[in-house]
Amino acid sequence: MKDTLHMNTMLIGLLGHPIKQTYSPFIYNMAFDINKLDFIYLPFDVPASNLRNAIKGIIALGIAGFNVTIPHKVNIMQLLNNVSEDAAVVGAVNTVVNDQGKLSGYNSDVYGILKSLEKYKNVLIGQEMTVLGAGGGARAVVYTLIRYFKPAKINLINRTEQKAEALKTYFSEKMKFDDFKCYELFPPNLVEILQNSKLIVNATPVGMFPESDDAIISIEKSFHKEQIVFDLVYNPTKTKLINIAAKQGADVINGLPMLVNQASKSFELWTGETMPVESITRSLELFIGH
């Protein structure tokens, strides 16, 4: 927290309910300090029934921008003046810029996912891929894969196959991509599907602290050294899924690059400046500490 706030300190907020343990204030306030910007980032617990009033308050108070988390990512869209193409197709907004009462919404998760996978782009284009989950994270992942990596096929695996089917239908209509196959999460039946996937993305919270002993897939023969396994969970930095996949020789990516890069896009939208990504990542690794 800053020692002194000035008359011209710009306020950025986070709207969610409940506001769970979040690293966003740590990330942004450190970035503001490093870049010597007179900004401060604060979380606000806003129940769904109060969202419209909160937005009116943000405009009235001249708050420069805000992040949006569960449960507001979809409902916020009807309260905005503009929504970016990414956010419109994903169907969720997580970053809003307030320009003198005119609110513009973005989905910086897409940028975070793209940056996390960037160095693998050449080996991933045109390959078979698997996404675990069918929630908001999975939507951003599927959109990014279709738009930037041209998959030969995407396997959607979810606890309820119906939700995976709904995702398939949505993206078939929105992006004219039909090469989906949906499966219920029943690991013994999925080994061959996972083995055939060049990329496996866990877009569920399974394995997140404090349930760090859980893994959405724990069958070792699901993974091999020709694969990339990307777990959006960032706490712990080495999830059980990451450990199992790495032991089998797969290239692994944890959720920290996604977390920091999506934040860097929001930071840029609010401030016009570049976030010090490497410094923030190193500090977060120490801060999370496992």
Image (tube, rainbow, N blue to C red):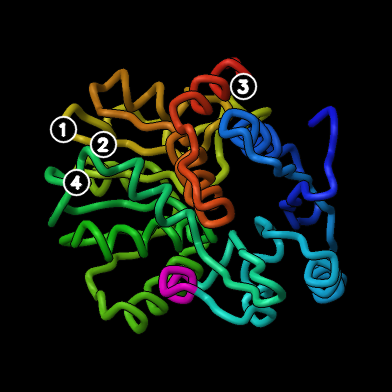
Mark 2 — residue? 228
Mark 4 — residue? 121
Distance between the alpha carbons at the discs numbered 4 and 1: 14 Å
Q: Is residue 19 visible?
A: no
Horizontal and vertical percent for residue 28? 63, 39
Under circle 4, the secondary element is helix
Horizontal and vertical percent for residue 241? 43, 30
Are the residues at dot 1 and dot 3 in contact (C-beta closer than 8 Å)?
Answer: no
Q: Is residue 222 visible?
A: yes
Distance between the alpha carbons at the discs numbered 1 and 3: 30 Å
What's the residue at 22%, 70% (across, down)? Answer: 179
- Looking at numbered disc 3 in the image, what kind of residue is underneath it? Ile
Provide the residue span drawn in magenta.
84-90
Mark 1 — residue? 226
**Magenta stretch containing residue 89, yes or no?**
yes
- Looking at numbered disc 2 in the image, what kind of residue is underneath it? Ile
Q: Nearer the viewer, mark 2 or mark 3?
A: 3
Horizontal and vertical percent for residue 172? 32, 79
Horizontal and vertical percent for residue 243? 40, 21
What's the residue at 21%, 35% (across, down)? Answer: 227
Which numbered disc flags the more N-terminal residue, 4 or 3? 4
Which numbered disc flags the more N-terminal residue, 1 or 3? 1
Which numbered disc flags the more N-terminal residue, 2 or 3? 2
Are the residues at dot 4 and dot 3 in contact (C-beta closer than 8 Å)?
Answer: no
Judge by depth and name the residue closer to the eye, 45 or 130: 45
When the figure is inspected, residue 263 is found, relative to residue 170, above or below; the finding is above
Distance between the alpha carbons at the discs numbered 2 and 3: 24 Å
